[in-house]
């Protein structure tokens, strides 16, 4: 038997091997318990619930429990300024003393946004556009226009504002929409010296109606009368009237139209 084989079988080798195994186990145990102690394994302080709390109260609570903190902000129109809306780590998470807790609060000043171009959009398109820009719809009013619910004007603070105007995010804007009925006022037609049939046509074409017809003087041919006065009349100070207004006219006998020379010779 070789000397190495004899050594392996000897009591001295067994003791050496046992001693080495014990040393390795001791090193592993020391490292494990040292690491557990260093990291405070299984222990810590639960993070308090801070969401919904005012930032001043949240900071006071964090300081009492030995935490550090960092604050970010975001604007939310329907939340009171200074309210904690997010926290990291989450509530009840066990962390070491002195850990930094990250908070997000509602800012007190809204960021400015550019008013989008909504003129000529319809009502539904305008609503979607406002929502995309973080704006809200205030009041709506209607004005005469051929298109129903078309945006004619955008108002903010009682004043007409155009696309690109800077306003606070979350603000409400008012819309002036078309009523789909066209113009509410039309030009008063000049009917003087027109025959009655032509006057009727002009009145109807203007969106008005024929009122009282008053005959002046002797009328021998009712089919040949001309307008000698009307009410209302177009003037420099009043050239328009509301749709549907009744136009009263006064007519007199028209002058007989002379026959052409060829027809006179035949007679």
Image: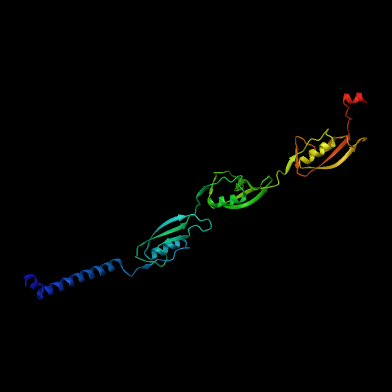
Quadrant position of the C terminus in the picture? top right
* The one of 103 and 249 positioned closer to us in this rendering: 249
* The one of 10 and 161 positioned closer to us in this rendering: 10
Number of marks in picture: 0
Q: Is residue 171 visible?
A: no
Q: Is residue 214 visible?
A: yes
Looking at the image, residue 182 lies above or below residue 87: above
Residue 90 image point, x, y percent: 42, 64
Name the residue furthest bottom. Answer: 11
Looking at the image, residue 195 lies above or below residue 88: above
Where residue 24 sits, quadrant-wise, is bottom left
Residue drawn at the location 77% of the way across and 40% of the way down: 205
Would you say 193 lies left or right of 52 here? right
Where residue 63 sits, quadrant-wise, is bottom left
Residue 43 image point, x, y percent: 33, 70
* The one of 188 and 16 positioned closer to us in this rendering: 16
Residue 191 image point, x, y percent: 81, 35
Quadrant position of the N terminus in the picture? bottom left
Would you say 29 lies left or right of 84 here? left
Residue 175 image point, x, y percent: 62, 49
Looking at the image, residue 265 lies above or below residue 168: above
Residue drawn at the location 89% of the way across and 26% of the way down: 263
């Amino acid at each position: 038997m070789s000397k190495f084989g004899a050594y392996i079988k000897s009591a001295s080798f067994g003791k050496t091997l046992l001693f080495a195994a014990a040393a390795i186990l001791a090193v592993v145990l020391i490292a494990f318990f040292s690491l557990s102690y260093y990291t405070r394994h299984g222990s810590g302080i639960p993070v308090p619930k801070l969401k919904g709390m005012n930032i001043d109260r949240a900071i006071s609570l964090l300081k009492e429990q030995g935490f550090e903190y960092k604050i970010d902000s975001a604007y939310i129109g329907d939340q009171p300024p200074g309210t904690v809306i997010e926290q990291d780590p989450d509530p009840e998470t066990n962390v070491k003393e002195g850990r930094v807790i990250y908070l997000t609060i509602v800012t007190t000043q809204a960021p400015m946004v550019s008013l989008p171009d909504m003129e000529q959009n319809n009502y539904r398109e305008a609503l979607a556009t406002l929502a995309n820009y973080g704006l809200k719809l205030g009041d709506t009013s209607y004005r005469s226009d051929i298109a129903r619910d078309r945006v004619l004007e955008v108002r903010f603070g009682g004043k007409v504002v155009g696309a690109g105007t800077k306003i606070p995010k979350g603000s409400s804007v008012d819309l002036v929409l078309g009523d789909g009925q066209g113009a509410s006022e039309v030009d008063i037609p000049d009917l003087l010296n027109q025959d009655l049939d032509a006057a009727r046509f002009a009145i109807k074409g203007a969106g008005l109606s024929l009122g009282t017809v008053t005959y002046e003087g002797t009328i021998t041919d009712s089919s040949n009368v001309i307008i000698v006065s009307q009410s209302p009349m177009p003037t420099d100070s009043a050239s328009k009237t509301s749709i549907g207004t009744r136009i009263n006219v006064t007519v007199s006998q028209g002058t007989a139209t002379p026959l052409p020379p060829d027809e006179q010779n035949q007679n």
